[in-house]
Image (cartoon, rainbow, N blue to C red):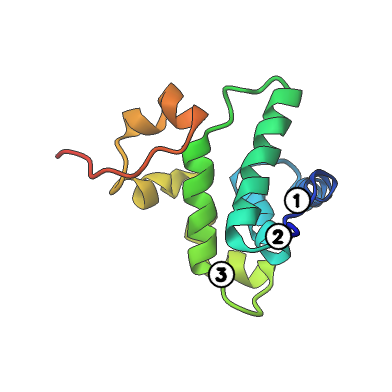
Amino acid sequence: MTSLAPSPARFDALFGRCVAQHGRFGHPAHLHLAWLLLEDAPALEALAMFNAGLLALAERLNLNDKYNATLTTAFFFLVLERRQAGQNWEAFAAQHADLLDWEQRGRFLGPFYELEALNSAAARRGFLMPSVPTP
């Protein structure tokens, strides 16, 4: 079976496009990259490229403490959930400005994760399944 996933070169090109458009690789650019990868490949293949590409980038730049597999995967699926057929990035971003606001992350992930768990070494290394935080 032939993989439809974007190549590392394609990841790098899309990454460059996001940085150029957003001026830096902050949270909105991360989500834009996820959105672009979802335009190129089925969801699980796009997710694999997103995670692998971001991890490789963090390693190349010696920013290993910046990569968080749990946050990356959770926000990827939020983008997937909210995407609409035929919608361009600008329309997506305008409709889901709350998702692009890093300060709102607790609103999205708080019902499923303790802050301590999200900041853990385990969350950085691999995806942690959601769990209901204790009150």
Tag 3 or tag 1, which sits nearer the N-term? 1
Give 26 or 111, whichever is nearer the viewer: 111
Residue at mark 1: 18
Which of pointers 3 and 2 lies earlier in the amino acid sequence? 2
Q: Residue at x 48, y 58 (%)?
A: 78
Q: Which residue is mark 2?
A: 36
Number of labels in the image equals: 3
Say whether marks 1 and 2 touch (CB < 8 Å).
yes
- How far apart marks 1 and 3 lie (CA) works out to 18 Å
Residue at (71, 31) in percent of width and height: 56
- Viewer-side residue, 24 vs 115: 115
Q: Could you classify mark 2 by the number of other residues whose Cα lies within 10 Å: few (under 14), some (14-19), or many (20 or more)?
A: some
Distance of label 1 from label 2 (alpha carbons): 9 Å
Q: Amino acid at mark 3?
A: Arg
Residue 75: where, in percent of width, then height? 50, 50
Q: Badge 1 local density, few (<14 within 10 Å), some, or many (20+)?
A: many
For the residue carrying disc 3, how many other residues have a C-alpha within 10 Å: few (<14), some (14-19), or many (20+)? some
Q: Which residue is mark 3?
A: 83
Task: Give the image quarter of residue 58.
Answer: top right
Above or below — where is 25 with respect to 1? above
Q: Amino acid at mark 1?
A: Cys
